[in-house]
Image (cartoon, rainbow, N blue to C red):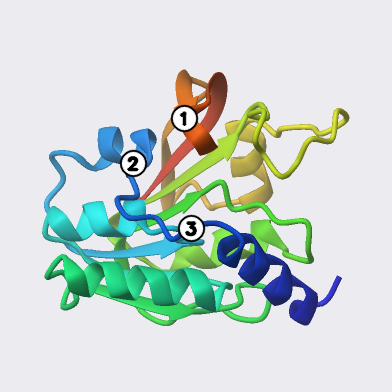
Amino acid sequence: MGTTDAVTFWDEVYAGRPAAVDPRPNARLTETVTGLPPGDALDLGCGDGGDALWLAGQGWHVTAVDISAVAVERLAALARARGLGDHVAAVRHDLHASFPHGAFDLICAHYLRTPHDLDRADVLRSASRALRPGGRLLVVDHGSAAPWSWNQDPGARYPSPLEVAAGIDLDPALWSIERADTPRRIATGPGGRTAEVTDHVLLVRRTA
């Protein structure tokens, strides 16, 4: 499917549900970033904006990108309403076509999957190259499907964190893997539904 289809798909996903009033950050982000000195962060596929808003509240300057203009506009409005407009730059960006400019101390990609064309390994390689020395790339993927997930394919396969790292093919002289595991958690979905899910967590640090 083409870019136009992807834009339409994700705009309809967000427009079809109420705007999030208080989006929460992902648990893997908060446990990874708490205690790190704030700097410049890039949130790939920001969605409702829980991660970007939490990071901004911790003092980070965040560039939050999403293919959906609906998601981006809602996040920008939330940031302004919370007095975080100076810390959050919410922009529509199609990662299938290009990668945001800049150098970052933290780049996070939570559940960056789509039914449309996206060379995810190339996106993550670009993210790795956009890290400053000492910066970290946090990639969190689904290791299982929640009952409310858009992807209910029973044949879906979830690559392990080390498989994701191998696909990025980073030079060990420049990047090191700090974390690669598959923790479980209780997730909350629409309407307050809960389910136990598995996360695949990869944390890469640029060492040089």
Element type at mark 2: helix
Kindly identify the residue that appears in the image at 85 percent across and 28 percent down.
154
Residue 93 placement, left or right of 155: left
Q: Residues within 10 Å of mark 3 (few under 14, many from 20)?
A: few
Residue 59 placement, left or right of 184: left
Above or below: residue 153 compared with residue 68 = above
Comparing 12 with 37, the one in front is 12
Whether residues under marks 3 and 1 lie with C-beta atoms below 8 angstroms apart, the answer is no
Q: Counting residues from the N terminus, which is met first, the one under dot 3 or under dot 1? A: 3
Element type at mark 3: loop
Kindly identify the residue that appears in the image at 56 percent across and 58 percent down.
124
Comparing 208 with 144, the one in front is 144
Question: What's under tag 3, amino acid-wise?
Answer: Pro
Comparing 41 with 9, the one in front is 9
Comparing marks 2 and 3, which lies closer to the viewer? 3
Residue that mark 2 sits on: 29
Kindly identify the residue that appears in the image at 53 percent across and 52 percent down.
171
Above or below: residue 18 compared with residue 179 = below
Q: Pick the quarter of the image with the N terminus.
A: bottom right
Q: Tell me where residue 93 appears, x and y as whole percent.
A: 53, 79
Q: CA distance from mark 2 to mark 3?
A: 24 Å
Identify the disc placed on residue 7: none
Q: CA distance from mark 3 to mark 1?
A: 14 Å
Q: Residues within 10 Å of mark 1 (few under 14, many from 20)?
A: few
Do we see residue 62 in this rendering?
A: no
Q: Tell me where residue 61 appears, x and y as whole percent.
A: 20, 69
Residue that mark 3 sits on: 18
Kindly identify the residue that appears in the image at 12 percent across and 70 percent down.
83
Q: Tell me where residue 182 appears, x and y as whole percent.
A: 53, 22
Identify the disc placed on residue 192: 1
